[in-house]
Image (spheres, rainbow, N blue to C red):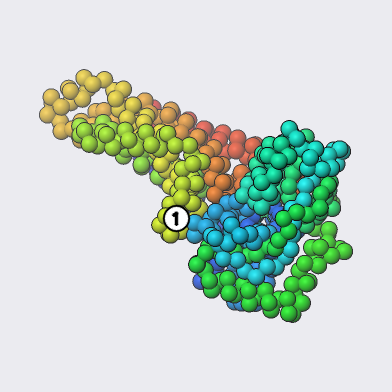
Amino acid sequence: MKRKMWAVLTTLAVFFACLVTFNLSATPAKAETTYTIGTDVTFPPFEFANKQNKYVGIDMDLIRAIAKNQGFKVKIKPVGFNAAVQSVQSGQLDGVIAGMSITKEREATFDFSKPYFTSGVVMAVAKNSKITKLSQLKGKKVAVKTGTSGADYANSIKNKYGFKVVTFDDSNNMYEDVMTGNSAACFEDSPVMRYGIKQGTKLKIVTKPAENGSYGFAVEKGHNQKLLKSFNKGLANLKANGQYKKITEKYLGKDASKDTDSTSDNSFFGLIKQNKSALWSGFKETLWLTVVSIIFATIFGVLVGLMGVFPNKFLNGLSTTLIYIFRGLPLLVLALFIYTGIPSLTGQKIPAFVAGIITLMFNEGAYIAAFVKGGINAVDTGQMEAARSLGLPFGRAMRKVILPQGIRIMVPSFINQFIITLKDTSILSIIGILELTQTGKIIIARNLQGFKVWTIIAIIYLVVITLLTWLSNWVQKRSKL
Ligand code: GLN
């Protein structure tokens, strides 16, 4: 049995080592003056993924041109508008460029650059809708995007016009809700809505722009002042040398609609072929997250589980408390707490990947601790008594007599937990980790092929889960022999 266990452990170690090497080789070296800039998932013509899944648009071209002009580097994080704003506020990201309106309230927590674009909020309805005025929204639902000035505007007038507000994390889901008829209208920035309609979004604009204002690049108040100054200087230079005009004309001028997806192959296999590199890197990230967090969660879970059966009241209490807290917290809340909550208190950045691993380690680890404790407790108490009465100390009795029996009881639960861990990685898309689910969101944001893309993503998850189950069953069989 011992030899078999070693064989199994070695196989697993080799598997993990392979993963580590291929992931490390895929990680590029970091340059020194790199700023991490958050942006929206999709907000065309300001930011959107093109066919090669590269982020382009007015904001993207501007920030890259300014970076070049001022001699710094940027790393773009398309985490979604609300997440980007919050991450800058908590110091997780250095700045945000996402068609962000300069408002009085925001100026209390952000320092804005000089304005670079003017815009306002319009109301859009489905193509065949009869609604043309705010007053016709009575008793209806209106879709908005979380944390935007459009959402603020809707909330400020909802009582007056008697409508209900429903929020979405990105523009496409908001449009979709109106197109399917769930919501009667949505509020969106006018240049974005006009651009979207020109590109084929089946909505129409029915009001004049309200709440007119300007977009600015933002950093956390009192922080990253050097970056802000460089942005302003670069922007002024780009305006003076004609580059600013070139960029805006590229997306808003006469031949602006070249980068549409209408010509691309939207069949099932066409989509796979077109997005294979994005899907592949999303897949690798998911696998990598799963493997690393399984390792940490197992270590954490086994330790906490053992603490629960150790003959020591304090350790027992600690174990119960840890399990209670981390099993009780929803994964999403824990992820947001670690990624945005803690850094806003300490001022220390935690990279999204690390925050994701910590989240899964605690959450999955708490479940592991619970069944490790249960597994050990399930071994007949007489066994421990017998071993101790033979003179074995607690540690040895545990190692030699109880654990070998307990582990057998735990194996199916471990397998179950590993599969759950894999599925739970999808929740980490909320903190912007580019794993499979976030990759799916970004692809759909560009081509609006929700059904097919989610089918592809679902199949990939199922394939991985099948492989993981096979591997686990194989391990289980070997360890039983
Ligand atoms: N301009 C709006 C705001 O600042 C919307 C921005 C966005 O959705 N990316 O709130």
For ligand 1, tell me if the residue under mark 1 lies within 8 Å. no
Residue located 75% across and 54% down the image: 210
Ligand 1, by image quadrant, is bottom right
From this view, report whether residue 478 is shown above or below residue 383: below
Residue 28 appears anywhere in the view? no
Residue 440: % across, % down: 66, 45
Image quarter of the C terminus:
top left
Q: Secondary structure at mark 1?
A: helix
Image quarter of the N terminus:
top left
Residue located 61% across and 44% down the image: 437
Residue under label 1, please give it: 343
- Along the viewing direction, whichever of 4 and 277 lies nearer the viewer: 277
Residue 324: % across, % down: 37, 33
Q: Is residue 41 left or right of residue 12?
A: right
- The image quarter containing residue 239 is bottom right
Q: Is residue 78 left or right of residue 252?
A: left
Q: Is residue 153 left or right of residue 130?
A: left
- Along the viewing direction, whichever of 33 and 242 lies nearer the viewer: 242
Residue 197 appears anywhere in the view? yes
Residue located 65% across and 76% down the image: 234
From this view, report whether residue 60 is shown above or below residue 41: below
Amino acid of disc 1:
Pro
- Along the viewing direction, whichever of 220 and 375 lies nearer the viewer: 220
From this view, report whether residue 175 is shown above or below residue 395: below
Residue 148: % across, % down: 65, 51
Residue 403: % across, % down: 29, 30
From this view, report whether residue 52 is shown above or below residue 444: below
- The image quarter containing residue 138 is top right
- Along the viewing direction, whichever of 244 and 422 lies nearer the viewer: 244
Residue located 43% across and 47% down the image: 358
